[in-house]
Structure formats: structure tokens, C-alpha cells
Image: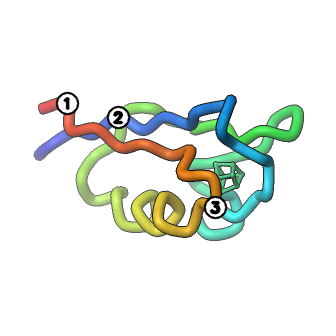
Amino acid sequence: MAKYKVSVDKKKCIGCGACVSICPKFFELKNGKSHAKKTEIDEKDLKCIREAKDICPACAISIKNVK
Ligand code: SF4
């Protein structure tokens, strides 16, 4: 199964919390910025992370295919 790497650009993140609301399993707010709880994820978990990426008003979330 393909693996993906998820990261949040702390400089872009405005701390709105939308990603945490839509995908609390993988994102949390720390010191007013979003933080990926897990950086390497399986394809099956991509759905809610993609939704978070799409909803992020600052385009701070990136997903890269690592395998
Ligand atoms: Fe930051 Fe985007 Fe998450 Fe909002 S949705 S907290 S801007 S990463």
C-alpha cells in the first residue's frame, strides 16, 4: 500500500482549526498552529486528510507520496 507524508507549513497556518474539526485523528492545534499527529500515513487514511487540505484557507497542508 502506498505511503504518504503529511506536513503543515507553520508559517502559512493561521490556526483556524478547520483541519482539526474535519480530521481530529490526524491534526491538533499546538500553540495556535496545526500539527500533524502522524507524518507518515497509509492510503486508507488519506480521505479526511485530503478534506482537511482542501478546506484549509491558508493552503498550509501538503501531502506527498513517498512510495
Ligand atoms: Fe492551519 Fe489550515 Fe489547519 Fe487552519 S485548516 S489550522 S490554517 S493548517
Looking at the image, is 58 positioned above or below residue 7? below
In the rendered structure, which amino acid carries the disc numbered 2? Answer: Lys
Q: Residue under circle 2?
A: 5
**Where residue 3 sits in the image (x, y, percent)?**
22, 39
Looking at the image, is 66 positioned above or below residue 52? above
Q: Quadrant of residue 19?
A: bottom right
Q: How many marks?
A: 3
Q: Residue under circle 3?
A: 57
Residue nearest the observer in this picture, 29 or 58: 58
Real-space Cα separation, disc 1 to disc 3, in angstroms: 25 Å
Real-space Cα separation, disc 2 to disc 1, in angstroms: 6 Å
**Where residue 60 sits in the image (x, y, percent)?**
56, 44
Question: Quick one: label 2, few (<14), some, or many (20+) residues within 10 Å?
Answer: some
**Which callout, 1 or 3, points at the residue further toward the start of the chain?**
3
Real-space Cα separation, disc 3 to disc 2, in angstroms: 20 Å
Q: Is residue 61 left or right of residue 50?
A: right
In the rendered structure, which amino acid carries the disc numbered 1? Answer: Val
Q: Could you tell me which secondary element the residue under label 1 belongs to?
A: loop
